Amino acid sequence: MEHTSPLTAFTPDMFMRNFAEAEPGLSRKGAVEESNRCLYCYDAPCIKACPTGINIPSFIKRIATDNLKGSAMTIMESNPVGASCARVCPTEELCEGACVLNDASAPIQIGLLQRYATDWAVNSGVQLFKAGIPNGKRVAVIGGGPAGLSAARELAREGFAVVVYEAKQLAGGLNTHGIVSFRLPQSISLWEVEQVEKLGVEIRTGIKIGVDVTVEELRGEYDAIVLAAGMGYVPPLGIEGEKLSGVYDAIELVETTKTGIPTLELMGQRVAVIGAGNTAIDAATCSVRLGAANVKMVYRRTRSEMTAYDFEYEFAKQEGVEFNWLTLPKRIVGDELGNVTGLECVQMKLTGETGKDGRLKPVPVEGSEFVMPVDAVVIAIGQKRRTGLIESLGLEHDSGIVRIDPKTGRTSDPMIYAAGDIVFGSGNGEAMVVSAAQQGKDAAYAIVKQLSGLQDGVIGSAV
């Protein structure tokens, strides 16, 4: 696409139009018809495919019988962030991928049905669960994302006094700040936060552990700690030009669009997004909707090695994002005023050798350097590990990946449990919202057993 100069400021009307949910929800008629397609399998493979073990046939049956509160409770009982997961889970790879109807017709649209039921709960204002009888025990949760919220909710339902420490001004983690609004509106994540707060959980925002509250204070005030701090912003590439005006962190880019009219100006610009994961896709599609004239994703490997989900890749293509495979950035080029004007790259080829991750190693093709004309560069090559926080807690880790007992989430310190992105990596599970939610639950259940002497008790209660 031919480059044009910035045309106009990004207006509120443009923001509302461009960042509204991309996929519409089901109508009541559509939801009932779709739920009646379900075979309500006795030994349902969709349940086994869900990391949080939602009783999917049960919640779908309740939609068919117009029991939407019962349906929402079934979902949220298993998954404290089930409303968000209805929108962001890779259902094609999980529950829908396991549906027995795949071989006969088309799988049940489980994600959309889950959204239909949880949207009812969001809009009705109903409180689905209640706190347990106070047991006199106190637990601190570091991080208010999906893992931290899940742990806090389950602990509160069992009678624990829980305080969540969240560094940002709003809880919810990436669901609130780092997933584009046209896939996950911020209001959905904040409703899940509110559901946890209604159980008496205190969420202290704008608080950084080690800065505003010391580790010693936590150890002295609480009986257990859940570390669910996730990861930080995107690390630098380590190439020349990263300090130029027009170079952005992918997470920060998305975040500017989550809390109001974005101040970032991409109207008419040519944008290169470096990376090929789900966050890179979000940054690319976000750039399109911020008015960029052309958006290219730059990745040093091929389509088959990219880590983004297939449905994310297809969505990006539909949005007009272009893909430059086997392309490695070497330098960000700028003008005399310090503005980005290009991205110097080199073509790559895959060798027959494999790296530690099992993927083929890419190597540069001699003499293949070229400059891609761009006005902005977005870096989306993963996120920083919170090594400083981990070490301040005295926990064993592998390059920022906290070591845990996979069944309980207990760390090298018997008082501290960990869950979510801070433990994902190096073959230790996949960093999905739904997986983080389950890990938060597992940590809570382990704390209940440790502090209450409960061996096989039932956790929590509904309203």
Image: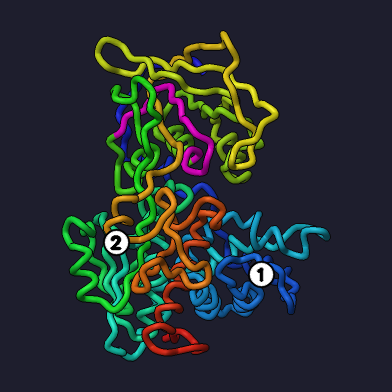
Which is nearer the eye, 90 or 447?
Answer: 447
Which is nearer the eye, 425 or 142?
Answer: 425
Distance of mark 2 from mark 1, alpha carbons?
Answer: 35 Å
Q: In this view, does 451 lie to the left or right of 166?
A: right
Which is nearer the eye, 313 or 151?
Answer: 151
Q: Name the residue under label 1.
A: 48
Q: Mark 2 points at which residue?
A: 393
Task: Residue 196: give x, y in percent of width and height.
Answer: 35, 73
Q: Farthest residue toward the left?
A: 212
Q: Quadrant of the C terminus?
A: bottom left
Whether residue 227 is in magenta: the answer is: no
The image's mark for residue 8 is none
- Image height of 60 relative to 313, above or below: below
Residue 360, quarter of the rendered image: top right
- What's the residue at 41%, 55% (across, down)? 397
- What's the residue at 40%, 71% (across, down)? 151
Q: Farthest residue toward the right?
A: 104
Callout 1: SS? helix
Q: How crowded is mark 2: few (under 14 residues within 10 Å), some or many (20 or more)?
A: some
Observer-side mark, 2 or 1, equals 2
Task: Residue 112: give x, y in percent of width and height.
Answer: 59, 61
Q: What residue type is labelled 2?
A: Leu
The magenta region covers 264-281
Which is nearer the eye, 441 or 406?
Answer: 406
- What's the residue at 29%, 84% (across, down)? 137
Q: Can residue 215 be seen in this view?
A: yes
